[in-house]
Amino acid sequence: MKTSDYKELFKSEADEILQGLEEGVMNLERGSDREPVIEELFRHAHNLKGMSGAMGYDLVVEASHALENILDGCRRGTLDIDSAGTDVLLKVVDLLGALVRWTIEEEAGPGGNELLGEILALLDPMAGGNDGRCRGDQAGEDGGSAAEPESKETPAEEAGCAGTPAGMNSGIKSTKVDLERLDKLMDLVGELIISRIRLGSLAAEAGSRRLSEELTSSGRLISEIQKEVMEARLVPAGQVFHRFKRLAREAARELGKNVDFRIEGSEIGLDRTVLESMVDPLVHLIRNAIDHGVESPEERACSGKNETASVVLSARRERNRVILEVSDDGKGLDFEKIRQNISSSGQAVDRNAELTEEELCRILTAPGFSTRENVSRYSGRGIGMNVVMKVIDSLGGSLHVKSVPGSGTSISMHLPINLSIIKALLFHAGGNIHALPIECIKETARVEEGSFRTIRGRDVMETINGPVPVIRPGEIFGLDQEKAEIRFIKVILADTGEGDVCLVVNRILGQQDVVVKSLPNMIRGISGISGATILGSGKIAFIWDPRVLFHGRSTHESDKETVVSQN
């Protein structure tokens, strides 16, 4: 066997095991039911040893064998792990990860032996040994040198049911697929959708009913393939979420706070690009919750709260969007202090009026804004929330902040599940076809020309929720609006995240799945354009991002001010 052929698989499996070890150790510290946790930790260490032995990675075998002995002693009740012991085990897991990476990369030098020595030196006192190795019962299957490759047990033997054929014919239920292969498959599905749209246009031009019917039938099959590929490409949020447990633990200990950090919805799937992009924003929000949000144990006790604060990282799915949320039960935002510091961000807000959610988001995410007087390792520079907002904007998402003084704060991010293929509304404006993501569309309508009202020099359309600003594409892009003597005009009511706008267009062409293509270098970075798609005609349509394109244009006067101005 050429071990080089299996390195990527070994690395993937080892990463999962190391993550499981870290999470299990922290579960011990949180006081979880110890017996199943110890069993799970032992299984992880045992599996890593077996995999490493098959690959001939003797140093990893010896290190994981030493850890396995400690965990075996815990299983048998001859050893116990206290809070200091969990610190040691977390350090061992870190070193074990470094040893695995060193081994896979085949680095030269004494680094591997030094890492192994550190691991054994940490584990030896826990086992009570004095010979440089962990002491434990090494009889039976683990007898002999730890560096020697072991005979791997059958699944039945590992389960403790040797000699029974149960489960032997259950079949393979899942397999691992490289993410790059899934990305390639998604690209091919995208090209298939573009081809289907082109064929639909040709069938319409030819007037062939039979061809149109066949294309409709094949379109349903392509949609099913698209749905399955998109679902397969989604990555469970837990693959990223669980790494934050260690972050929260270390931040709480350094700041002298008792924090119960919980994860909810780790099974929710997100597009890999979205999930990877959210790592840095989530790091900042979790640190913010622990540093700014929750109080010290003494402060919580004085307020009648449990001395252990709660910080929750959650994910939930609503229609075609995923909501990631970081919430805490701390002291909440200090609105008075925020008002006092508004001047530092250069923003103008009525200091006597209650802050709306939109205003609060705008203030907190402004570059340089901070309520901290001194800069610490975790906060005070006023750049973190600005970075969070920029990432969310780049993904076509929105940020929402809710806070109750004395009860806590929750910051939620509404994000698209998938970035490759979206449903969009196509419309005609300025002689070209454009697209808006369907989740931003509230409704489309046909209204009479001249039905708009003017309030302080600005056209608005009356809706059931009050007046909505009217926007014409020519105001933004300098597009020439088609002029004709017509009684009715087409409008699109869109949600910008700050409020609604009424977009006047020439024609509404309908909604369809579109494949999002990145913009060419020459126009990349144009504010308000998130991508492009290829139409059935072969032409390109730009995809608008209303949260950026209409920023600041969705505000309108309150109903009271409107009545006053009209009278």
Image (cartoon, rainbow, N blue to C red):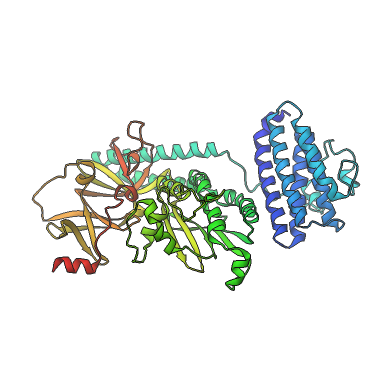
Residue 474, x across and y down, in percent: 19, 44
* Residue under the image location 39 percent in, 44 percent down: 218
Query: Can residue 269 be seen?
Result: yes
Q: Is residue 85 left or right of residue 449?
A: right
* Residue under the image location 12 percent in, 58 percent down: 450
Q: Is residue 452 left or right of residue 198?
A: left
Residue 196, x across and y down, in percent: 36, 40
Tally the numbered discs: 0
Q: Is residue 129 left or right of residue 334?
A: right
Q: Please identify the quarter of the rendering in which residue 147 is found.
A: top right
The one nearer the camera, 11 or 221, is 11
Residue 137, x across and y down, in percent: 90, 49
The one nearer the camera, 174 or 94, is 94
Please identify the quadrant where the N terminus is shown: top right
Q: Please identify the quarter of the rendering in which residue 259 is found.
A: bottom right
* Residue under the image location 73 percent in, 63 percent down: 33
Please identify the quadrant where the C terminus is shown: bottom left
